[in-house]
Image (cartoon, rainbow, N blue to C red):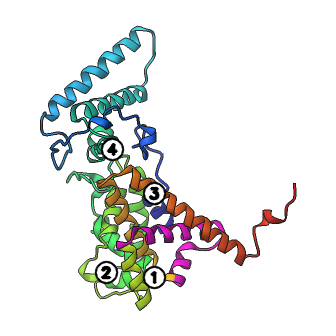
């Protein structure tokens, strides 16, 4: 349950958008790169302060609706997805023009406004409606407390101990661990999933669970601290873990045995790096880290292949 959920949070992203942020400048032609100049941005919306949000939205709507009218006049049958994409493209065009910015700034803007313009939450920019029914407590347990319980259990603490500390029967945990993931699947805005990830990154706890401590060696503590501050070390371990899974090895258990870092701590750091990346989007850095992880994954794949007597395909001649 946890590994599947964590995979969705930190890598195996859900197919939910028509408007995926682009991860490389190679995918977005920036006509203004040579003329970039400093612009003051609102810290929350990342709109330029030299115009109003209303003026921006009106400009996007005017251009989009004019295009839609022309398309329909020429006989095109536009569905809702087509219309959303037209607005998405004009939003990018207007933002880039009005702020004379590069594509990285444009993507940061999209992250900051993802809920407003696409109906989807982005890690690092979570906006919560107090009346959201998906966030109503289950058996008196809110999402933050549920996340704290998940952290303890995925750190290796028996769920029965966690239930005892919380003061309820194991059947309650079973219901919690059914209903909260179910809500994550039903919530099309991904508020529950993204907020869960944010709490996980914060390594949240509650008073009832503070005395439950997962064992960690001195070496594990040192590796964990290094992983929090050294992005390359984190990418190396992420690549190693993925390579392990591909060779039929439990990657999380392999990381625990070889580096002393449990699943909860590993995923907490993964969420921290993902949030930092979303908030400070830099395509060049993203490509560099991605390439580094892939290189390390290949290195560890070769290591696992050697330990297992070589790849099966090594003995096949064509």
Quarter assignment of residue 158: bottom left
Q: Which is closer to the viewer, label 1 or label 2? A: 1
> Which label number is shown at residue 288?
3
- C-alpha separation, residue under disc 3 versus residue under disc 2: 44 Å
**SS class, disc 1:** loop
Q: Looking at the image, do the residues carrying marks 1 and 2 touch, with CB atoms under 8 Å apart?
A: no
Q: Which is closer to the viewer, label 1 or label 4? A: 4
Q: Which is closer to the viewer, label 3 or label 4? A: 3
Give the left or right position of residue 252, taking residue 183 as reference: right
Q: Residues within 10 Å of mark 4 (few under 14, many from 20)?
A: many
- C-alpha separation, residue under disc 3 versus residue under disc 1: 33 Å
**SS class, disc 3:** helix
Question: What residue is shown with label 4?
Answer: 107
Mark before the other along the chain sequence, 3 or 2? 2
- C-alpha separation, residue under disc 1 versus residue under disc 4: 38 Å
> Which label number is shown at residue 231?
none
Give the left or right position of residue 123, taking residue 26 as reference: left
Is 29 situated above or below 46?
above
Q: At which x and y percent is residue 310?
A: 76, 71
| Foreground of the two, 230 or 81 | 230
Q: Which is closer to the viewer, label 4 or label 2? A: 4
| Foreground of the two, 172 or 12 | 12
Q: At which x and y percent is residue 12?
A: 50, 55
Q: State the extent of the magenta-drawn residues as a range.
A: 229-258
């Amino acid at each position: 349950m946890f590994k599947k959920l964590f995979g969705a949070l930190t890598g195996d992203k859900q197919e939910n958008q028509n408007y995926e942020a682009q991860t490389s400048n190679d995918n977005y032609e920036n006509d203004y790169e040579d003329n970039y100049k400093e612009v003051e941005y609102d810290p929350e919306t990342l709109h330029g302060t030299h115009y109003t949000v209303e003026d921006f939205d009106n400009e996007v709507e005017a251009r989009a609706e004019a295009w839609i009218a022309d398309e329909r006049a020429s006989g095109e049958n536009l569905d809702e997805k087509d219309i959303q994409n037209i607005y998405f493209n004009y939003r990018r065009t207007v933002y880039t023009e009005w702020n004379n910015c590069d594509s990285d700034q444009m993507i940061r803007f999209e992250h900051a406004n993802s809920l407003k313009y696409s109906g989807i939450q982005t890690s690092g920019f979570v906006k919560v409606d107090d009346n959201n029914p998906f966030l109503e407590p289950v058996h008196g347990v809110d999402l933050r407390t549920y996340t704290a319980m998940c952290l303890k259990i995925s750190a290796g603490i028996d769920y029965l101990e966690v239930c005892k500390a919380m003061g309820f029967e194991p059947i309650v945990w079973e219901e919690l661990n059914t209903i909260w993931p179910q809500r994550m699947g039903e919530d099309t805005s991904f508020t529950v999933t993204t907020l869960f990830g944010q709490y996980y990154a914060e390594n949240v706890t509650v008073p009832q669970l503070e005395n439950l401590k997962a064992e960690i060696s001195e070496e594990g503590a040192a590796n964990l601290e290094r992983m929090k501050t050294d992005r390359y070390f984190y990418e190396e371990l992420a690549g190693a873990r993925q390579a392990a899974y591909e060779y039929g090895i439990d990657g999380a258990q392999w990381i625990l045995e070889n580096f002393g870092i449990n699943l909860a701590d590993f995923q907490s750091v993964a969420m921290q790096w993902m949030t930092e990346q979303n908030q400070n989007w830099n395509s060049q850095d993203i490509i560099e880290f991605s390439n580094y992880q892939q290189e390390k994954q290949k290195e560890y794949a070769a290591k696992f292949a050697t330990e297992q007597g070589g790849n099966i395909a090594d003995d096949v001649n064509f």
